[in-house]
Amino acid sequence: MVTVSLIVGILVLIVPAILSAVWLGSTFWQASASKNWLKAEGVVIESRLVSNRNCNGFPGYHYHVRYQFPLFGSPYEAISVRLGDFRYYSRSGAEKTLAQYPAGRPVTVHYQVPDDQAEVEDGCVACLLEPGLNRECLYPIAITLIIGFLLGAMLTGLAMNFING
């Protein structure tokens, strides 16, 4: 009986680790690839602080930076600053990013155009102002790993209690 609960426990703990490792590898690959994307000169057209309480009810703040750059001869707008673009900061943390991107500031936009022109028309162009890996990329992975291990430990405990009666 102990062997079965041990196997269940190991499997339940390994699955989140494997999923997180795959996610982490994908994130590293995308972050590395973003450094080689095409570049265009653009301009920040909107830069503002947003209270999370007003938009989703959660605590904290996030920044909203909207920029425009020419794509195939037409203006294109995007809002992603970094890969991951975490949305939960202290007020000063969000303001720090906003200070780098005030409205009217010229910026270099890194972008990747999809193969299908219809995706471009649907707004599916990946754009970043800061390509590469950053700590914001790792937050969702860390949260998933922590929750997965906590859930795994709880399920292992339940399985052991159930098996041992």
Image (cartoon, helix red, strand yellow):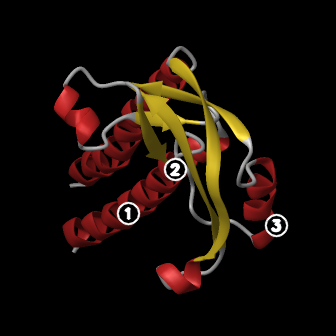
Q: Please report the residue visible at 53 percent of the width from the left and 35 percent of the height from the top.
A: 69
10 sits left or right of 77 in the view: left
The tag earlier along the polypeptide, 2 or 3, is 2
Q: Amino acid at mark 3?
A: Ser
Mark in front: 3 vs 1: 3
Disc 3 crowd, CA 10 A, few/some/many (<14, 14-19, 20+): few
Q: Please report the residue visible at 47 percent of the width from the left and 80 percent of the height from the top.
A: 56
Give the Cα distance between marks 1 and 2.
34 Å
Tag on residue 22?
none
Say if 80 sits above or below 160 in the image: above
The spot of residue 77 in percent (x, y) is 46, 45
Say if 161 sits above or below 139 in the image: below
118 sits left or right of 23 in the view: left
Q: Please report the residue visible at 38 percent of the width from the left and 63 percent of the height from the top.
A: 151
CB within 8 Å, label 3 to label 1: no
The tag earlier along the polypeptide, 3 or 1, is 3
Mark in front: 1 vs 2: 2
Disc 3 is placed on an element classified as helix
Q: Where the N terminus falls, by quadrant?
A: bottom left
Q: Which residue is mark 1?
A: 151
Disc 1 crowd, CA 10 A, few/some/many (<14, 14-19, 20+): some
Q: Which residue is mark 2?
A: 79
Q: Which residue is mark 3?
A: 92
The tag earlier along the polypeptide, 1 or 2, is 2
The spot of residue 35 in percent (x, y) is 58, 19
Q: Amino acid at mark 2?
A: Ile
The reply to whether residue 94 is in sight is: yes
Q: Please report the residue visible at 22 percent of the width from the left and 71 percent of the height from the top.
A: 162
Say if 67 sits above or below 130 in the image: below
